[in-house]
Image (cartoon, rainbow, N blue to C red):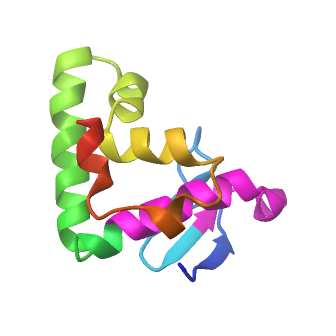
Amino acid sequence: MTVAMVFVSKYLVPRGFRGLTLYPFIFLREAKDKSDAVLIHHEKIHLRQQSELLVLPFYVLYILEWIIRFCYYRNIYVAYRTLSFEKEAYRNETDFEYLKNRKWFQFLRYL
């Protein structure tokens, strides 16, 4: 089970986003999102991705994949939504049992 510390910071979370995960913290743009189970679960999936990649490599891979996808799609939002890490999180954010059964490096399935 992933234990996360959740904080609210409208200054740290970029505009247009509701949450940001920086291991081991989840930052939310608005306090009302603390009760959004789907959003929190989405961010917990990112915590698992970050921990299995030993944190720093996660950020390196995330940024590199985003650059590649941005060069391909020429759209910031499309580049973000097509990241393997985001696809895994979005496709499984409503399955609250997902992290109990998730195998290692599942984000690779979404490349």
Location of residue 86 in the rendering, given as x and y in whole percent from the top left corner: 41, 43
**Magenta-colored segment: predominant secondary structure:** helix
In the rendered structure, the answer to whether residue 96 lies left or right of residue 78 reads right
- In percent of the image, x 63 and y 50: which residue is there? 95
Q: State the image quarter where residue 71 is shown.
A: top left
Query: In which quadrant will I find the C terminus?
Result: top left
Q: State the image quarter where residue 70 is shown.
A: top left
Query: In which quadrant will I find the N terminus?
Result: bottom right
* Residue range of the region highlighted in magenta in the rendering: 27-49
Location of residue 12 in the rendering, given as x and y in whole percent from the top left corner: 54, 62
Residue at the front extreme of this rendering: 101
In the rendered structure, the answer to whether residue 16 lies left or right of residue 54 reads right
Location of residue 101 in the rendering, given as x and y in whole percent from the top left corner: 47, 64
Location of residue 24 in the rendering, given as x and y in whole percent from the top left corner: 46, 80
Residue closer to the observer: 60 or 91: 91
In the rendered structure, the answer to whether residue 46 lies left or right of residue 85 reads right
